[in-house]
Image (spheres, rainbow, N blue to C red):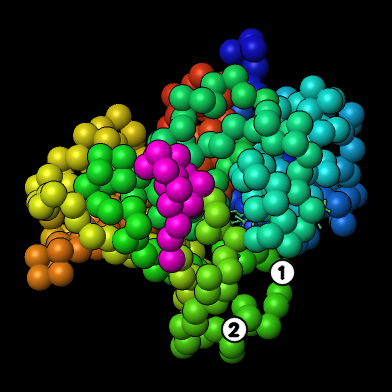
């Protein structure tokens, strides 16, 4: 690529929350620019019709989903589409010579049966699943360089795994004892209106949903099993919180070999030493979702209970940034061999 020219980006699903967050973040990327915003339902209309906050930033009309036209305008396409859409679109986009970064779950699980069981939709073709690189950037980032098809991890999965992987890999916790208690803001459910995300249903309430049925369960287990070197199953519970952005995962596990708070702190600081988006909090300080709002950070804190022999690990992310668009751009940077922080050095919005 001629470095005087920016990498051209198209976004399918640009009218959704993940898509519009890609537009926001890419607007300040030094080496990439959005050249096509695409809609399957409102091509020919301006994106500012649905998103007036983009006035003066993206005034062009939405394009159609047509691979050859997209290729004439872009080098990389981000798919921010509902489940089972990317698996239909990616083969033609790849054939047209585009690189594809998928924010949905379609290329995360290598096992097609697992996808169909948990997502209740048809799985992607085996041939493309084999090509897909799973982009949990801090763990598998070194596999992403030069990839043509990147599968961006789930939002809950990112928060949970960044909090668990170092301890599982080092054998500091018993993988079979892990319980993940997760909470998300409502933008995690996308822009479409539904009864469950309706203001008067959600406001002043906290509710558990999809218990033991959440589609991110097999993705978390896939990575924990890989890291532990044996099959791991886990209890993963999700809750909807009346806030716009943010995910907190509170994770409980039995500590092995009398590892201390200092041991954990040293392990996590060393694991994430060269990973600029993971911040380990000092002992006794637990992170809040507000402290990563609008940023690509994942903040992690610990609490030890010598009475029960358990550690509680708390991790927080912004679901739309580190949980979706931010990590997808981080993966694009890694794919291109660039500094992973390009275009992502936002200070969290506070308060
Ligand atoms: N929201 C979040 O925090 C996160 C979301 N994700 C995943 O990212 C993906 C997008 O999520 P999100 O932005 O929240 O969802 P939204 O529902 O807000 O947006 C999805 C967009 O996809 C487009 N779309 C729907 N059907 C098709 C189709 N057949 N072909 C092409 N485009 C289609 C729609 O736009 P149009 O009708 O204009 O084409 C819609 O605006 C999902 O898979 C989601 O699970 C992952 C991590 C976090
Ligand atoms: C609050 C809320 O509803 N969150 C969504 C997150 C879904 C998501 O991002 O799904 P994929 O990553 O699998 O595409 C959920 O729990 O289903």
Where is residue 97 drawn, in percent x and y? 79, 22
Q: Which mark is drawn over residue 192?
A: 1
Given residues 342 and 60, the one toward you in this image is 342
- Which residue is depicted at the point 46% across and 83% down? 206
Decide: is 178 above or below 209.
Answer: above
Where is residue 87 drawn, in percent x and y? 77, 44
- Upstream in sequence: badge 1 or badge 2: 1
Q: Is mark 1 within 8 Å of ligand 1?
A: yes
Q: Which residues are magenta?
A: 220-235
The reply to whether the C-beta atoms of the residues labelled 1 and 2 are less than 8 Å apart is no
Q: Which residue of the protein is positioned furthest toward the top in this rendering?
A: 2
Where is residue 322 drawn, in percent x and y? 47, 48
Picture quadrant where residue 72 is located: top right
The C terminus lies in quadrant: bottom left
Label 2, on which residue? 199
SS category of the residue bearing label 2: helix
Where is residue 32 drawn, in percent x and y? 61, 28
Picture quadrant where residue 76 is located: top right
Q: Is mark 2 within 8 Å of ligand 2?
A: no
Decide: is 290 above or below 231.
Answer: below
Residue 209 seen:
yes
Q: Is residue 165 left or right of residue 173?
A: right
Q: Which residue of the protein is positioned furthest toward the front in this rendering?
A: 230
Given residues 19 and 273, the one toward you in this image is 273
């Amino acid at each position: 690529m001629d470095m005087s020219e920016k990498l051209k980006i198209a976004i399918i699903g640009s009218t959704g929350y993940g898509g519009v967050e890609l537009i926001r973040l890419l607007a300040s990327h030094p080496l990439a620019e959005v050249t096509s915003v695409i809609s399957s339902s409102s091509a020919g209309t301006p994106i500012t019709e649905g998103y007036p906050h983009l006035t003066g930033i993206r005034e062009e009309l939405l394009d159609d989903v047509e691979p050859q036209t997209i290729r004439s305008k872009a080098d990389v396409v981000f798919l921010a589409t509902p489940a089972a859409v990317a698996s239909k679109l990616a083969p033609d986009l790849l054939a047209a010579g585009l690189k594809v970064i998928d924010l949905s779950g379609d290329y995360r699980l290598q096992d097609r049966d697992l996808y169909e069981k948990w997502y209740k939709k048809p799985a992607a073709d085996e041939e493309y699943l084999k090509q897909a690189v799973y982009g949990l950037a801090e763990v598998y980032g070194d596999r992403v360089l030069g990839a043509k098809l990147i599968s961006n991890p789930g939002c809950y999965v990112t928060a949970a795994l960044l909090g668990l992987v170092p301890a599982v890999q080092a054998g500091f916790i018993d993988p079979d004892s892990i319980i993940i208690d997760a909470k998300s803001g409502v933008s995690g459910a996308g822009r479409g209106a539904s009864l469950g995300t309706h203001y008067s249903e959600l406001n002043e309430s906290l509710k558990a949903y999809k218990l033991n049925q959440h589609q991110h369960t097999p993705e978390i287990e896939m990575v924990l099993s890989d890291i532990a070197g044996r099959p791991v199953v886990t209890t993963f519970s999700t809750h909807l919180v009346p806030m716009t952005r943010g995910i907190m995962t509170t994770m409980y596990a039995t500590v092995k070999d009398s590892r201390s708070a200092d041991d954990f702190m040293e392990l996590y600081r060393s694991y994430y030493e060269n990973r600029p988006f993971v911040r380990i909090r000092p002992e006794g300080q637990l992170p809040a979702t507000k402290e990563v709002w609008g940023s690509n950070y994942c903040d992690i804190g610990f609490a030890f209970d010598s009475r029960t022999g358990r550690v509680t690990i708390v991790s927080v992310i912004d679901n739309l940034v580190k949980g979706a668009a931010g990590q997808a751009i981080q993966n694009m940077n890694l794919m291109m061999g660039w500094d992973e922080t390009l275009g992502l050095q936002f200070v969290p919005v506070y308060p």
